[in-house]
Image (tube, rainbow, N blue to C red):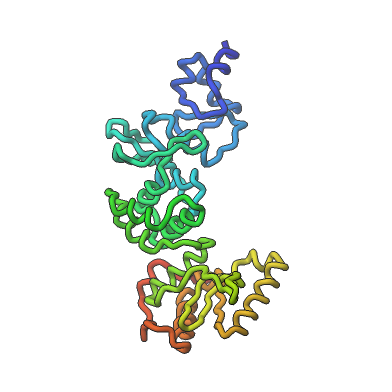
Amino acid sequence: MAMLVLVALDIRRPFSRADAVALGLDPRRLEGSGFRRVFRGVYVAASVELTPSLRAEAALVPFHPTSFASHVSAARLHGVPIPVVPDEHVSVLDRRHRRERAGIRCHLASTSAQVREVRGVRVSGVEQMFVELGELLTLVDLVVVGDHLVRTGRTTPARLREFCARASGSGARPARAAAAYVRERVDSPMETRLRMLIVLGGLPEPDVNLAIRDQDGMVLRRHDLRYRRSRTVIEYDGRHHIEREHQWEADLDRREETENDGDRVIIVVASGIYGDPGRTLARIWRVLRERGEPDVPSRLSDAWRPHFPARTRVA
């Protein structure tokens, strides 16, 4: 009988206790070392790696087949950068299908919700996910998601704004606000954060990854952020540059060439965004005013402060 159960029940995929019992598996075995309880009433073989995909699949087990992984669960399946959020999120299309489970947050979605399949799991489409994340993420974190989706070719700024304009629900308004800041060619989440610090500080928005070309149109270099009128370059410098010696040396040469061409280069590191964002913003503001960048305010806005709380040292 046990062998027949193993054939009928794929224990390497999440399954319910009820299904296991119905197929003749002794429920006491589920509490043994051979199985792992993922959620209440949902199990998988203990040897199986508990990946984001498998957790999302397990979260769907207690729900109707039309349900789908949404919000941060969808984000993890789509591989987008988000803060750590412990719960899984499931959306159902009928309020009668809602269930309560520890570790799973259940949402009611429209029957017209954008749903795709990723690695065999029903999941929100990327634009749908972006709107859902409006319920959970801050403005800056949501722009990070949008920039990443555009960079990886899964949507465009225009398509994202259009989807958000039609969307409804509690995440729609924050998603519309974030979509307005999503840009093309953003290379990393930290570049997004740096740009958002600048813009929320009330400064003009710089060009993103603008290509500098020679007389023949060949690309000489690109800069993370650049103000053309004042020829001010702002670049984020992460630790990975220091760890890769050749890249670090190439970056130094590129900066020297840039400054020789008349540009002013401002380098920002992680501590300048997380540790002392006010000082970073003031540095950029002073240089832009000194170099005559148009539309630079005489005083910085405080709108950046809720989004970039400085980390203070604790003795």
Instruction: Using the image as rendered, state which of residue 98 and residue 284 is in the foreground.
Output: 284
Q: Please, is residue 131 above or below residue 102 in the view? A: below
Q: Please, is residue 180 above or below residue 109 in the view? A: below
Indicate the position of residue 101 as horizontal and vertical percent values: 39, 35
Indicate the position of residue 163 as horizontal and vertical percent values: 33, 51
Q: How many marks on residues?
A: 0
Q: Please, is residue 288 above or below residue 62 in the view? A: below
Residue 314 shows in this picture: no
Tell me where residue 179 sits by quadrant: bottom left
In-image side of 248 versus 279 (left or right)? right
Indicate the position of residue 307 as horizontal and vertical percent values: 40, 66
Task: Point out the residue furthest to the right here.
Answer: 246
Residue 233 shows in this picture: yes
Instruction: Using the image as rendered, state which of residue 299 and residue 47 is in the foreground.
Output: 299
* Residue in the image at 35% along x and 51% along y: 131
The quarter of the image holding the C terminus is bottom right
Indicate the position of residue 175 as horizontal and vertical percent values: 34, 56
* Residue in the image at 40% along x and 47% along y: 129
* Residue in the image at 43% along x and 68% along y: 196
* Residue in the image at 50% along x and 20% along y: 27
The quarter of the image holding the N terminus is top right
Q: Please, is residue 74 above or below residue 301 in the view? A: above
In-image side of 136 versus 16 (left or right)? left
Tell me where residue 94 sits by quadrant: top left
In-image side of 106 versus 25 (left or right)? left
Task: Point out the residue furthest to the front here.
Answer: 216
Instruction: Using the image as rendered, state which of residue 298 and residue 52 is in the foreground.
Output: 298
